[in-house]
Amino acid sequence: MLKAMKKKRTVFLFGAGSLLHWNSPKTSELTDLIRSRGFKTSDNETYITEFIYQKLIANGNKESEVNFETIINVIEELVVYYSYFNNHDKTPSLLKCFFSANFEEDIFNFSIKGGVAKHNYTLEIPKGKNYDFSRPSQHNETPQQFFLQHLLAVLLSEINERISHYAYHTKGHSVVNCESTESTLFIKWMSDLEKNSYLRLYTLNYDRIFKILMMHNGIEVFEGFDCGPYVEYSTLLRANVRKILSDFDCNVHYNLHGSAFWKAIALDKDLLPNPELSLTCGPEFPMNHDFATMQVEKGKTIMVTNIVTGYQKAQKTLITPLKQILAAFDRDCCFADEIYVIGYSLGDEHINESIKTALRHNENLKIIIVDPYFLKNDLDFQMAIKLFPFRPTGVMQPTTLIPHRLHHFFNGAIRLHTIEFKEFLEQQANPLHKYEGLK
């Protein structure tokens, strides 16, 4: 009997640029959205997010470097600043012991209903006005912290709502077009690769689209939760953590930064604050639920949310199942035959570390990058610094094989396609048009 052929391990890392053909939002769109949403400052005209944006620009930050994640990060850091270091003893945060803020009159446009911040107090937002989505305080939140958490919940709900525009998918209704040109091309590419490879898909986006497309074509895919392309209504699925950590010989689609279709559950069955992330049927809006918080690092209160954005990602990905998914990505990279990096701008150091470690310890690893703006945005320089600091060859220089389209680095260890993802898929679908030597 012939021995079965050993399958390759093909890993994919999908960034924001990979889904533009499926109507996903660009960073600039989300930035514009966030700047015009949420609560207003004490003048009742300027949004707090716009106030933060203008403050950052006025203090020397370039407009090109301030986006929705920057704004959200400021709010998340203010949550840390205004939270108790120790909730039980009500000691202030470490930074608050040394620094005082000069913007409080501007942004804290709220009042406490009844005037006393006791257990179960609620907020009026803006001052003196009932707020329909006000939650009761149950975990010794300071009023400022609680207000900022309400603000974060609104902003993240807005992002989740935008994700649902292109990724909503339930048994009764779906906006995912499995028959579109780009979807058909993607399905064919996955089907061709699946014959000889385990497909290990990781996404930094907040949707399930690629899993849905693959299962539409009969490719079994595990996403960390035991379900098919649909989740039953009113169902909360707990992650299958044991399978995430043990089964590496199957096709997967993992959300490294959470999903608009996950829910952050604040309390366990005993009503204790043990946050958990679960998969649900449709998009989740944090403003409709109690807020889940925890301290991954001592004294630094973070808000547990279904999507991970801002710059606290390293802390937030220590929460189950994100911790196990990141561990799976780390292992997959180290044992991969090839890694496709599509539409990712090298902006997350905890992700870069996994790729860098793989390049250092996996000598035969091949990386294929698809990004039309990679060289224009000087990402080759960033890659040389972030992923290849141990290489003895100095500054990395590309070898251009086809101008404006195809480049090699390090004698072919990295292959760069400076074309749109859809064009790349067209090339994979038609072997007669593939680049010479890349079949």
Image (cartoon, rainbow, N blue to C red):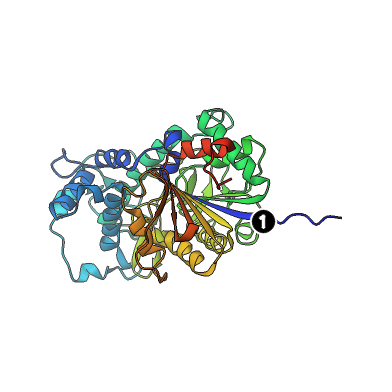
Answer whether residue 227 is visible to the viewer in this image.
Answer: no
Seen from the viewer's position, the closer of residues 88 and 403 is: 403
Q: Position of residue 264 (x, y in %)?
A: 46, 50
Closer to the camera in the image, 317 or 232 = 317
Which residue corresponds to the image point at 62% horizontal and 45% vertical from the top-left?
193
Q: Residue 17: in sight, yes or no?
A: yes
For the N terminus, the image quarter is: bottom right
- Mark 1, Cα crowd under 10 Å, few <14 / some 14-19 / many 20+, is few
> Quick check: 8 above or below 193?
below
Give the answer, above or below, for where 10 lies relative to 360.
above
Q: Position of residue 211 (x, y in %)?
A: 57, 42
x and y percentages locating residue 283 in the rendered image: 47, 39
User: Circle 1 is placed at which residue position?
Assistant: 249
Residue at 80% of width from left, 57% of height from top? Answer: 3
Q: Residue at x 47, y 60 (%)?
A: 411
Quadrant of residue 170 within the rendered picture: top right
Amino acid type of the residue tagged 1 in the rendering: Asp
Q: How many marks?
A: 1
Left or right: residue 390 versus residue 187 is left
Q: Quadrant of the C terminus?
A: top right
Q: Nearer the viewer, residue 336 or 281?
A: 336
Hey, which residue is sitting farthest right in the picture? 1
- SS class, disc 1: loop
Q: Nearer the viewer, residue 113 or 102?
A: 102
Quarter-wise, where is residue 396 in the image? bottom left
Relative image position of residue 120 (x, y in whole percent):
35, 53
In the rendered view, does 150 fall on the left or right side of 164? left
